Amino acid sequence: MTYKEIVQKTIDLLKADANLSEPDKIKKYYFGVPIRLDLYPFIYVQWNERRATGKANISQFEYELILEIGVADRAVNEDIAEKSVYDKIEYIENTLNSNPSLDGLVSDVKLPKSIEIVRMSDKDYAVAFVRLLHAVRKWI
């Protein structure tokens, strides 16, 4: 298991959802935060942090790995961009909840997710950005 595999599996699972497919529903998926923000809507996935849970066995420790999933969209009308990211974050949550083990890469445990929304503007466009922090558990 590598951290790259967990991030890539998360991206692959999201892309496989009909509501989040690339390029029909999502213009671009990124492994990590993109440096150019010109294709909307986009999704990125990155690994943010590893936290010890305090559980251990003879040769391993259990950790929580915190993944950040970002979704952004833009539109001339701010409510359209905002509604779009609300829909997409629900699809993301449903996809992750339906496969909490990421096809066996991590423990089969559903953990709470933290969600934050940010509103911005880009010239004549309203931009809505949602950041979801998704924790998974892994024995390492």
Image (cartoon, rainbow, N blue to C red):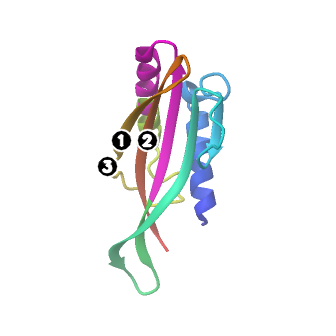
Quarter of the view holding residue 105: bottom right
Question: Are discs 1 and 2 less than 8 Å apart at CB?
Answer: yes
Q: Secondary structure at mark 1?
A: strand
Residue in the image at 56% along x and 21% along y: 123
> Looking at the rendering, in which quadrant would you find the N terminus?
bottom right
- Pick the residue in front: 46 or 58: 46
Is 77 included in the stretch rendered in magenta?
yes
User: Residue 112, which numbered label?
Assistant: 3
Is 58 included in the stretch rendered in magenta?
no
Residue 140 position within the rendered picture, expressed as x and y whole percent measured from the top left: 49, 74
Which residue in the structure is indicated by mark 1?
A: 115
Residue 85 position within the rendered picture, expressed as x and y whole percent measured from the top left: 45, 27
- Pick the residue in front: 10 or 69: 69
- The amino acid at mark 2 is Arg
| Residue 103 visible in this rendered orientation of the protein | no
Which residue in the structure is indicated by mark 2?
A: 131
Q: Is residue 66 above or below residue 88?
A: below
Alpha-carbon span between mark 1 and mark 2: 6 Å
Residue in the image at 42% along x and 78% along y: 61
- The amino acid at mark 3 is Pro
Alpha-carbon span between mark 3 and mark 2: 14 Å
Structural crowding at the residue carrying mark 3, measured as other residues with C-alpha within 10 Å and reported as few (<14), some (14–19) or many (≥20)? few
Question: Are discs 1 and 3 less than 8 Å apart at CB?
Answer: no
Q: Earlier in the sequence, mark 3 or mark 2?
A: 3
Quarter of the view holding residue 39: top right
User: Which residue range is magenta in the image?
Assistant: 66-89
Residue in the image at 48% along x and 49% along y: 68
Alpha-carbon span between mark 1 and mark 3: 10 Å
